[in-house]
Amino acid sequence: MKRSILWVFILMSLCVAGITVFQLYYSYKSYAVESAAFERNINEALNQAVDSTFKDRHNQVLKKLRGWLNDPEFITISCKWNEVQHLTVFNIKQVVPSADGQNDISMSIDYFTERADSLTPKARKIFIDHMIDYVGTELKKGFVWYYTQKLGDSINKAAFSEPQDINQIRRRYKQTLHTRGIDLPFLFDRNKLPENSITTKKVNIAVGRPQKEEWLQATFIDTNAFLMKQMRRLLAGSVGLFVILLLCFWYTAKTLLSQHKLNKMKDDFISNMTHEIHTPLSSILVTAEALKKFRHDEEAQQSYIDIILHQGQKLSALTEEILAGAKMEKAGMPLGDIIEVNAFIKNIIDNGHYKNIEYSGSGQSVSLKVNALHLANAVANLIDNAIKYNTADEPLVTIACTVSNKEVVISVTDNGPGIPDSEKERIFGQFYRIPSGNVHNIKGYGLGLSYVRKVVAAHKGVISVKDNVSSGSIFTIKLPL
Ligand code: ADP
C-alpha cells in the first residue's frame, strides 16, 4: 500500500477514535447533568409536597379559629377608645372563665387608627382578620401564643396534637413528582435501603417545626434506567452520528483501496499488453525485413508470409477481445436469436477444434432466446480457459447441459490446477489475473471472465465457480428459461 494512503488511513482512524472518545465523554457529562437535575427535582418536589401538607393543616386550624372567634358562646370581642394612648383597644374574653390561666386579653392593631368606642361590624372583621394573620404566622414558627387559656388550648390541640399524615405526604409527593415528569417508585423507609439508590436531603415533618424535629427522606431505587430514558434522544443521536461516521469511513476506505487496486491492475495490464503486442510486432517486422532484403525460394517466402499472417491474426484477435467488451457496453446486447442449446454447444465445440473434450447433453431439446454471438464467445472463453490453464498430464474438459423447469445449466469442468477460494470472486473482475507464477507463461489480459459475467448478466443469468472433486474447477452458467 502506498505510504500516502497508509497515512490517510492512520489519520482517519485517529479521527474516528478521537470523535468516539469525545462522544463518550460528552454522553458521560450529559449523564452527570441529567443526574444532578434529577436530584434537584426530587429534593424540590419533596419540600414542595411537605410544605403544601403543612399549609393545608394550618388553613384548617385557622378556619377553626375563625369559627371560635365568631362563636359568642366561646369568645366575646369588645373595644373602646383609650384617651391616653389615642388608639382603639380590643379585648377578647372567654365566656366560660378558666380556674387558672388567662381569661381575657386586650390589644391594639397598628394599622387600625380609627376611633371605635364600641365594636362595629367593620372593626370586628378587621380584628378577626388580624388575629387569623397573626396566628397563621405563629403556626409557621411552630408555636402559638395563649391569648386566653381556652383559645390557646384549642389552637394548640388543633395544630400540634396529631402528627403529620405520612400517607398524605406520600400522595402529594407522587403528584408533585408527576408534574415534574418523574413517575418512579420511592421509599420513605430508611431501614431497608437497596444499593444504587438515590436519597433526598432530610425534610422536617414535625408538627411543631422548626421548634421540633422529625426527619423524612425519600429514596429512589435503580434510577439508571430512568436517566437513560431521559437521555434516549441524545443517545440515539450520538449512536446515529457514530454509525454515519463509520459508514463514511468504511466507504472512503473502500474507495481508496479499490482506486489503489485499480491503479495496480492498470499497470499490470499495460505491462502485460506491451509484452503481448511487442512480440508479434517484432516478429512481423523482422520477417518483413527478411523478405525485403534477401531473395528466397517460393516455399521460404510462403512460410515467411504465413508467420506475418499468423502474428497479424494474433494482434487482430487481441484488439478484438479488448474491443468486444467496450462494444458490448456501448451497444448493449439484444437477445434476438432463438437457439437449441445442445446444438448450440456442439457447434461451439466443433468450431473450436478442441481436443479431449466430452459433452454430455440435456437429453431433451431446449430452446432459448439469446444473443448467439456473445453467448458463444462466453462459452468458448470458459472452454479456452479450461484448456489453457490445465497442467494435468491427461487434460480432460467436460461440458454438460442440464435443464430444469426454471433454468438451463451449462457447466464447464476441468481437471486443471483449480482456483483458490480467496480468488473465486476476484477472477470475474476486469483485468484480474491470479498473480501466482509468471503471468506471461499463459497468455491473457484478465478480460475473459469479466466479459463472460457481463454476457451472462445480460441474459439475466448467473455464473459461479466451484472446485472439481478430484482437482480442477467447475464453471457453471445458469440461464433462466
Ligand atoms: P485471462 O485472459 O488471464 O485468462 P480471465 O478473466 O479469463 O483472464 O481469467 C482470470 C484468471 O482466472 C486467470 O488469470 C486464471 O488465473 C484464472 N482462471 C480462469 N479460468 C481458469 C481455470 N479453468 N483453471 C484455473 N484458473 C483459471
Image (spheres, rainbow, N blue to C red):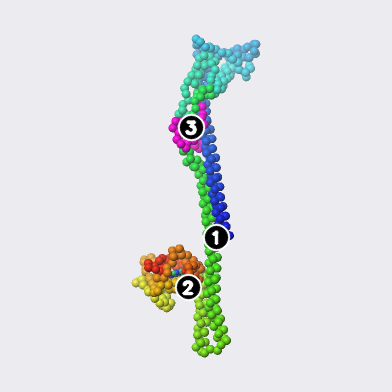
Q: Could you say where residue 367 lies in the image, as x and y percent from the top left?
A: 39, 71
Residue 340 in sight: no
What quarter of the picture does the N terminus occupy? bottom right
Range of residues picked out in magenta = 176-205
3 or 1: mark nearer the eye = 1
Instruction: State the separation of the CA atoms marked 2 and 1.
Output: 31 Å
Q: Is residue 177 magenta?
A: yes
What's the residue at 55%, 76% (across, down)? 278
Q: Is residue 187 magenta?
A: yes
Query: Where is residue 263 shown, x and y percent of the image?
Result: 55, 65
Dot 1 crowding, Cα within 10 Å, few <14, some 14–19, many 20+? some
Depth check: 58 or 280 in front? Answer: 280
Q: Disc 2 beta carbon < 8 A from ligand 1?
A: yes
Residue under numbered circle 1: 256
Q: Give the image location of residue 20, x and y in percent.
A: 54, 49
* Mark identifier at residue 218: 3
Residue density around tag 2, few if under 14, some if 14–19, many if 20 or more, within 10 Å:
few
Between 405 and 466, which is closer to the camera in this rendering?
Answer: 466
Residue pointed to by mark 2: 442
Instruction: Evaluate if marks 2 and 1 touch, with contact meaning CB atoms under 8 Å apart.
Output: no
Q: Residue at x 38, y 71 (%)?
A: 400
* Dominant secondary structure (helix, strand or loop) of the stretch shown in magenta: loop
Q: Position of residue 10 (x, y in %)?
A: 56, 55
Q: How many residues crowd around disc 3 within 10 Å: few (fewer than 14), some, or many (20 or more)?
A: many
Q: Using residue 207 as the reference point, say whether residue 118 is left or right of it.
A: right
